[in-house]
């Protein structure tokens, strides 16, 4: 191939990709498409899966999290990790025995508000001479609860296990987390090494690492180049719309076919997954079912609806024991949630903590 042909090929490619590049910059500056606006930022530590399988931060760090939706900061708050890299109190030594292991997800980590479980440990639990360890991390499901349960039993001989859960936890398969210098992300195995830092731009669930010294204005300016705006997200949105249109047509057809069929109440996210059932069985076998307490947290405004109550009923059949349904007995109001984000705010978490501290069944389980 001669030099002239190479130049011509380069010019053709350049003329094709230059408009796309310019369009990408314009879309990023305009923050389009709109449904690509959510961004999670993490400062002071990375978030990853321990060799034993459970998620953790780096030990003894001051961590800051920010959630951004489009042009606005939904929340920005700080917390500390203990010597295990967990949002927990106190620091534990190698041969310590603990009375209580706590498992949960972002609602028990305190994402979007403040680490209420740590306050519960420092005050109510410590006053009752109960030593505990909180494995709650954002994104955890029941298989993650199992990993935390196994680790607490193996290394700290944990006596009892309290699991704070929301409905969606039963539908989250186990997936390790990994990290690089720019972000923490849900791992896809060998693909992580192939993509390198591109994981931060291509993976769906990512915490971008940032400098905590940045002002809100500086953070927002940088965010628009990290958010999934531009040509590729716009193309993905178009493909999703095509797929959803097809799905809606199929749903209408299925509704007509099932119109005269008598069916039991359908759960919001479908049938409870097999991996969740297996994880619950293993947790109960590990501790003994009477030494495990399942507590369902309020996750939306008001009390649970009919389908949510049906989910709790089926979960009770699975755990073969009573579930403490705080969603029903301790509902939250609109003012208890962040405006832009679905997590509770500081007042919402304080209400959850107060309801837990005052619940007779929870206190009875902890004491005996």
Image (cartoon, helix red, strand yellow):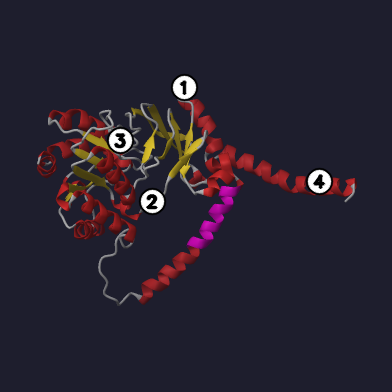
Q: Give the Cα distance between marks 3 and 2.
A: 27 Å
Q: Earlier in the sequence, mark 3 or mark 2?
A: 2
* Label 3 vs label 2, nearer the camera: 2
Instruction: Label 2: state its secondary structure.
Output: loop
Task: Name the disc covering residue 174, or none.
Answer: 2
Residue ID for mark 4: 11
Which residue shows up at 28% across the image and 28% down it? Answer: 91
Q: Is residue 143 above or below residue 244?
A: above
Q: CA distance from mark 4 to mark 2?
A: 47 Å
Q: CA distance from mark 3 to mark 1?
A: 23 Å
Magenta highlight range: 232-244
Could you tell whether 2 is left or right of 293 in the image?
A: right
- Crowd tier of the residue under label 3, counting other residues whose Cα lies within 10 Å: few below 14, some 14–19, many 20 or above: many
Q: Position of residue 43 (x, y in %)?
A: 44, 29
Q: Residue at x 49, y 36 (%)?
A: 183
- Contact between marks 4 and 1 (CB within 8 A): the answer is no
Circle 1 residue:
213
| Residue 306 figure quarter | bottom left
Name the mark nearer the viewer: 4 or 3: 4
Residue 52 visible in this rendered orientation of the protein: yes
């Amino acid at each position: 191939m001669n030099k002239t042909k190479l130049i011509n090929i380069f010019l053709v490619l350049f003329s094709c990709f230059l408009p796309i590049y310019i369009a990408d910059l314009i879309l990023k500056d305009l923050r389009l498409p709109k449904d690509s606006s959510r961004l999670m930022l993490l400062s002071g530590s990375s978030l990853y899966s321990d060799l034993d399988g459970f998620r953790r931060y780096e030990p003894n760090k001051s961590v800051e999290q920010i959630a951004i939706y489009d042009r606005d900061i939904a929340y920005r708050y700080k917390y500390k990790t203990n010597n295990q890299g967990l949002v927990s109190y106190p620091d534990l030594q190698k041969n310590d025995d603990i009375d209580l292991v706590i498992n949960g997800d972002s609602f028990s980590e305190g994402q979007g508000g403040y680490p209420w479980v740590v306050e519960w440990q420092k005050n109510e639990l410590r006053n009752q001479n109960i030593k505990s360890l909180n494995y709650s991390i954002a994104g955890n499901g029941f298989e993650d609860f199992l990993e935390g349960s196994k680790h607490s039993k193996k290394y700290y001989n944990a006596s009892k296990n309290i699991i704070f859960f929301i409905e969606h936890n039963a539908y989250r398969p186990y997936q390790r987390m990994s990290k690089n210098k720019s972000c923490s992300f849900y791992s896809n195995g060998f693909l992580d090494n192939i993509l390198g830092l591109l994981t931060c731009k291509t993976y769906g669930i990512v915490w971008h690492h940032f400098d905590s010294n940045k002002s809100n204005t500086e953070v927002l300016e940088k965010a628009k180049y990290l958010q999934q705006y531009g040509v590729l997200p716009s193309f993905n949105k178009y493909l999703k719309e095509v797929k959803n249109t097809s799905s809606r047509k199929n749903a209408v057809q299925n509704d007509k076919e099932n119109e005269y069929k008598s069916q039991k109440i359908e759960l919001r996210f479908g049938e409870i997954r097999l991996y969740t059932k297996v994880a619950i069985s293993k947790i109960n076998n590990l501790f003994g079912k009477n030494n495990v307490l399942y507590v369902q947290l309020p996750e939306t405004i008001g009390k649970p609806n009919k389908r949510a109550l049906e989910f709790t009923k089926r979960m009770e059949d699975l755990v073969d024991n009573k579930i403490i349904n705080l969603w029903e007995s301790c509902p939250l109001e609109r003012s208890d949630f962040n405006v832009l984000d679905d997590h509770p705010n500081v007042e919402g978490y304080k209400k959850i903590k107060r309801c837990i501290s005052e619940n007779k069944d929870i206190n009875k389980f902890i004491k005996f």
